[in-house]
Image (tube, helix red, strand yellow):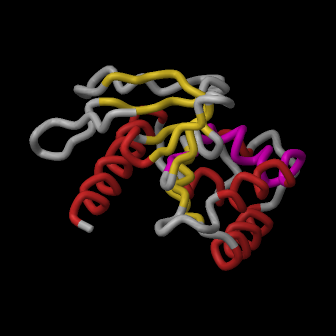
């Protein structure tokens, strides 16, 4: 796929995984989104991907994984194996997969919001994240709203694109 960015290196196209349940649209930004199958993550830029036309799948070298608060807690519990498999696919990347969570760290630690109805203690979250950061190539970002999480994801993609272009 052609590299699409403006003269400042800001990507004009973001690839979005077709399996996204509540996708970000980046409507307030000057980017186009294309729905494709990503092997890892939910959002990537074309320049950071290789495409397998036979499988019609894009293989990113950097991606953002979007998690609502509920999805994040599910990834820690019932879907833990599926999520850790996702993290393992990013082990060989030069930079960690960015997991952007649409809830604040304070909300999780204070048992509010998505935590209010879950049977999981904040210490379990801290312990699991500490282990994952030590064992996998992952960085977690917690934002207090969906809108801020969307902006953070785009900034992470832009930052990675600028670094990649300088290397």
Query: Residue most toward the front?
Result: 54
Q: Residue at x 52, y 48 (%)?
A: 60
Q: Residue at x 71, y 52 (%)?
A: 86
What stretch of residues is rendered in magenta? 63-80
Residue 131 in the image: above or below residue 100:
below
The count of marks equals 0
User: In this image, 15 relative to 21: left or right?
Assistant: left
Q: Nearer the viewer, residue 151 or 57?
A: 57
Taking the magenta stretch, the answer to whether it contains residue 67 is yes
Q: Nearer the viewer, residue 63 or 140?
A: 63
Q: Nearer the viewer, residue 137 or 25?
A: 137
Locate residue 35, reporting x and y percent.
52, 22
Query: Residue most toward the bottom?
Result: 134
User: In this image, 74 relative to 143: left or right?
Assistant: right
User: In this image, 92 relative to 6: left or right?
Assistant: right
User: In this image, 56 relative to 74: left or right?
Assistant: left
Quadrant the C terminus occupies: bottom left
Where residue 164 sits, quadrant-wise, is bottom left
Residue 30 in the image: above or below residue 121:
above
Q: Nearer the viewer, residue 9 or 49?
A: 49
Residue 148 in the image: above or below residue 32:
below
Locate residue 63, reporting x and y percent.
50, 49
Q: Residue at x 79, y 54 (%)?
A: 76
Q: Residue at x 85, y 46 (%)?
A: 79
Taking the magenta stretch, the answer to whether it contains residue 131 is no
Locate residue 157, reporting x and y percent.
37, 48
Quadrant the N terminus occupies: top left
């Amino acid at each position: 796929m052609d590299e699409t960015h403006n003269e400042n290196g800001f990507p004009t196209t973001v690839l979005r995984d077709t399996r996204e349940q509540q996708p970000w649209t980046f409507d307030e930004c000057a980017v186009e989104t294309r729905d494709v199958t990503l092997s890892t993550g939910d959002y990537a830029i074309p320049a950071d991907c290789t495409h397998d036309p036979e499988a019609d799948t894009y293989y990113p070298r950097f991606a953002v994984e979007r998690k609502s608060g509920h999805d994040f807690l599910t990834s820690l519990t019932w879907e833990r194996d599926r999520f850790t498999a996702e993290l393992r696919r990013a082990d060989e990347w030069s930079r960690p997969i960015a997991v952007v969570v649409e809830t604040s760290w304070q909300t999780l630690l204070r048992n509010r919001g998505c935590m209010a109805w879950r049977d999981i203690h904040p210490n379990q979250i801290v312990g699991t994240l500490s282990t994952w950061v030590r064992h996998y190539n992952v960085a977690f970002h917690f934002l207090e709203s969906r809108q801020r999480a969307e902006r953070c994801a785009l900034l992470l993609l832009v930052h990675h694109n600028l670094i990649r272009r300088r290397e």
